[in-house]
Image (tube, rainbow, N blue to C red):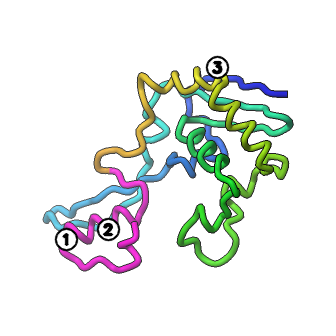
């Protein structure tokens, strides 16, 4: 059975792929001392979840597999990964991952029924052609989801890199990859 339904929420409806698609709750800001000297970055509440008064959530049921999407970026990420043959490994999706298997990645959490090539082709076709999915995308057209905000960095590494560059410090090699 195949179906897609929409629901509307006043708070951001977190979904399994939200963080992988760019959603965040913590941000980093630059601070200055009264003398004007820069301090190290400070963690703050990120404005991402509060940028809209109303959010739309797409719930998809496709041949026994349930999926939830909170924004079009998640849907695009899902389709781009699932359209690849062979299915990419966690290592390929998470370049630079430290030791161990990237078991927390959304792809590793999908049920095994969602991973065969025929199923992936069918669900991607469904997600591209379904009218409810089009309505979901249309909801975000007038006011697209923003991922970057003036003066707020999404990661400590981004904020630290900017701090080092602006204060004239050398940038360590591990920060240059970001």
Badge 1 element = helix
Query: Residue at position x 84%, y 47% from top?
Result: 113
Q: Mark 1 = which residue?
A: 167
| Left or right: where 140 falls relative to 79 | left
Quadrant of the rendering where the N terminus is positioned: top right
Label 2 – label 1 distance at C-alpha? 10 Å
The C terminus: image quadrant: bottom left
The residue lying toward the viewer, choosing from 9 and 78, is 78
Q: Disc 3 on helix, strand or loop? A: helix
| Residue nearest the observer in this picture, 118 or 114 | 118
Q: Where is residue 123 in the image (x, y as percent from the top left)?
A: 73, 37
**Which sits earlier in the primary sequence, circle 1 or circle 3?**
3
The residue that disc 3 covers is 131
**49 drawn magenta:** no
Residue sitting at x 54%, y 27%: 137
* Residue underneath mark 2: 161
Nearest to viewer (mark 2 / mark 3):
3
Q: Nearer the viewer, mark 1 or mark 3?
A: 3
Q: How far apart are marks 1 and 3 (CA)?
A: 52 Å
Nearer-N-terminus badge (2/3): 3
Mark 1, other Cα within 10 Å: few <14 / some 14–19 / many ≥20: few
Q: Give the range drawn in magenta.
A: 152-178
From the top left corner, tell me how far across and down residue 132 is, in percent: 65, 21
> Does the magenta run of residues contain 166?
yes
């Amino acid at each position: 059975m195949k179906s897609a339904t929409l629901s509307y929420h006043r708070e951001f409806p977190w979904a399994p792929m939200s963080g992988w698609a760019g959603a965040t709750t913590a941000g980093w800001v630059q601070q200055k001392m009264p003398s004007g000297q820069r301090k190290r970055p400070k963690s703050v509440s990120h404005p991402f979840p509060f940028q809209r008064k109303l959010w739309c959530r797409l719930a998809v049921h496709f041949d026994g597999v349930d999926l939830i999407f909170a924004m079009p970026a998640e849907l695009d990420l899902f389709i781009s990964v699932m359209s690849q043959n062979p299915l990419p490994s966690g290592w390929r999706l998470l370049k630079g991952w430290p030791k161990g298997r990237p078991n927390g990645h959304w792809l590793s959490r999908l049920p095994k029924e969602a991973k065969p090539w025929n199923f992936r082709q069918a669900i991607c076709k469904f997600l591209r052609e379904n009218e409810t999915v089009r309505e979901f995308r249309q909801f975000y057209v007038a006011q697209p989801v923003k991922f970057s905000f003036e003066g707020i960095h999404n990661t400590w590494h981004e904020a630290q890199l900017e701090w080092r560059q602006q204060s004239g410090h050398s940038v360590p090699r591990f920060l240059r990859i970001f």
